[in-house]
């Protein structure tokens, strides 16, 4: 058995594992990503990217590729037994200066993960496929992971290990972490198909008046495929051959003209809602489906997983660079309540779907997800309205005061740094820090808000400061008298010698 040393071992190369790897890579952390599968996951499964995830992807540098590869959701078309149909939009939100991405974007999971792997490769890293975790043991200084691939068994020594290895997580089982929840009493079939006889201008639904026979066929943006979703009997084998699925389509749609040409991927799964009892055990963490599983309604899963990784990545890098270990405890404190809420939301949406209802509310877009109860928050004085510590940072179109050049606030926030954002504030009130960018809007600052979009979204009194974390959430909101307290608080949390690496 061979032995090597790294900072972080990421087990699992789905959306969560890849996002975490990108976060670590752009901060210069020594890590490895392994996955039990020899080749990447081939199916659509999680096809919807929510607006908050699009904001995360903008920061990671993958949004242009995601937008080019996918497309907007089509209208929903309910087919009736008499041959008529009713069309309706899936949502009606429009972009605003504070929320530039208002609607979910469709991008099949295998394409999203391909784009993330390409970004990871551009940062100089690849996934070790066909590599299985067999055992782990940890002590006060690190984790020993026993791995096996096609050629050998070896032990890898890492300072931290993160299980991003799905609902049947080996990491979670090795830790003996409870996974309480309940079976939702439903099995479903999902498949990616090539077919003829159905238009691609709508998400087609048949049999909405019969929960046991509902069938949905959604054209997958960026491909020639349709995704099939339909319930199947709770027990027994399910035939997923082309002839069997052709018969199923004809029976449940009542359309003999829909001709199935190929089955590219198919899976039968039992729906459940479960949440890991804890997200951290010593130096080992759980993220993504390893920490929470739920029905697919509302398109929450992949998005919640990506945001788990976004939350954990900067904290691991900071602690590895000298920040106090307590920073890592905030991962569970912040993300587990979010997952609990998401399980409730997706379960309620499943019940609505059984009734034939697919309208999605603002809650599914995840723009209001925040951490107001986080131990990392600072407010001085306490705030009782408007933006508060723990909230998502809104975007705003601004201009450079010197020449009127347009610039978005999100462009200034993008990267691995923290941002001290002042409104007509004295820039010298915030001392320099290697991981802190100072931005002042209004007054003598370098940025101006000619249309009032910034102040409408942020409502910061003149002289006030907001401290933004690397993941785009407010860590602190202080008035002019407490600017020094904010800077000292940042130094205590990250360590004055903390420098994670260059901005990227």
Image (cartoon, helix red, strand yellow):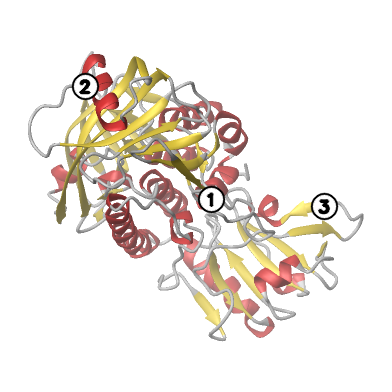
- Residue furthest to the front in view is 82
**Residue holding disc 1:** 51
Of the pair 356 and 254, the residue shown nearer to us: 254
- Tell me the SS state at disc 1: helix
Cβ–Cβ below 8 Å for labels 3 and 2? no
- Which residue is tagged 2? 240
**Of the image marks 1 and 2, the number of the one nearer the N terminus:** 1
- Mark 2 residue element: loop
Circle number at residue 142: none
Check if mark 3's residue and mark 1's residue have beta carbons within 8 Å: no
Residue on which disc 3 sits: 406
Residue 407 percent across, percent down from the top left: 77, 52
- Which image quarter: residue 210? top left
Q: Earlier in the sequence, mark 3 or mark 1?
A: 1
The location of residue 228, given as percent across then percent down, is 34, 30
* Looking at the image, residue 148 lies above or below residue 450: above
């Amino acid at each position: 058995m061979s032995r090597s040393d790294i900072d972080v071992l990421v087990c699992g190369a789905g959306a969560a594992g890849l996002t975490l790897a990108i976060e670590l890579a752009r901060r210069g952390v020594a890590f490895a990503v392994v996955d039990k599968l020899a080749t990447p996951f081939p199916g659509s499964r999680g096809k919807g990217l929510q607006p908050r995830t699009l904001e995360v992807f903008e920061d990671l540098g993958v949004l242009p590729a995601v937008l080019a590869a996918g497309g907007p959701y089509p209208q929903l078309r309910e087919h009736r037994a008499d041959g008529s149909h009713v069309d309706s939009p899936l949502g009606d939100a429009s972009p605003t200066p504070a929320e530039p991405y208002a609607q979910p974007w469709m991008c099949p999971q295998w394409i999203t993960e391909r784009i993330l792997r390409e970004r990871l490769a551009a940062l100089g890293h690849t996934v070790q496929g066909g590599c299985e975790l067999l055992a782990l043991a940890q002590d006060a200084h690190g984790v020993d992971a026993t791995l096996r691939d096609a050629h050998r068994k070896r032990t890898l020594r890492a300072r931290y290990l993160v299980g991003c290895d799905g609902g049947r997580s080996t990491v979670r089982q090795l830790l003996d972490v409870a996974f309480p929840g309940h079976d939702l009493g439903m099995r479903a079939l999902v498949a990616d198909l090539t077919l003829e006889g159905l238009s691609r201008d709508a998400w087609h639904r048949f049999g909405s008046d019969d929960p046991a026979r509902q069938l949905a066929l959604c054209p997958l943006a960026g491909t020639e495929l349709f995704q099939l979703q339909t319930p199947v009997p709770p027990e027994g084998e399910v035939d997923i051959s082309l002839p069997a699925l052709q018969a199923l389509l004809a029976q449940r749609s009542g359309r003999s003209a829909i001709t199935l040409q190929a089955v590219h991927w198919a899976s039968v799964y039992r729906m459940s809602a479960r949440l890991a009892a804890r997200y951290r055990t010593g130096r080992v963490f759980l993220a993504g489906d390893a920490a929470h599983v739920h029905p697919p309604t509302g398109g929450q899963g992949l998005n919640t997983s990506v945001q788990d990784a976004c939350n954990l990545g900067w904290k691991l890098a900071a602690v590895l660079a000298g920040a106090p270990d307590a920073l890592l405890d905030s991962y569970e404190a912040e993300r587990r309540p979010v997952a609990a809420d998401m399980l409730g939301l997706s379960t309620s949406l499943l019940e609505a779907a059984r009734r034939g209802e697919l309208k999605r509310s603002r809650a599914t877009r995840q723009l209001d997800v925040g951490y107001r109860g986080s131990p990392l928050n600072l407010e001085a004085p306490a705030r009782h309205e408007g933006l508060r510590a723990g909230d998502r940072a809104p975007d705003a179109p601004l201009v450079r005061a010197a020449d009127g050049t347009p610039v978005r606030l999100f462009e200034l926030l993008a990267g691995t740094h923290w941002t001290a954002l002042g409104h007509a504030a004295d820039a010298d009130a915030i001392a320099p820090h290697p991981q802190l960018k100072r931005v002042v809007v209004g007054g003598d600052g370098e940025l101006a808000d000619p249309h009032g979009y910034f102040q409408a979204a942020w409502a910061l009194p003149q002289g006030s400061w907001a401290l933004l974390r690397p993941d785009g959430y407010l860590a602190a909101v202080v008035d002019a008298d407490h600017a020094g307290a904010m800077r000292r608080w940042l130094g205590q949390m990250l360590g004055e010698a903390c420098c994670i690496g260059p901005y990227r």
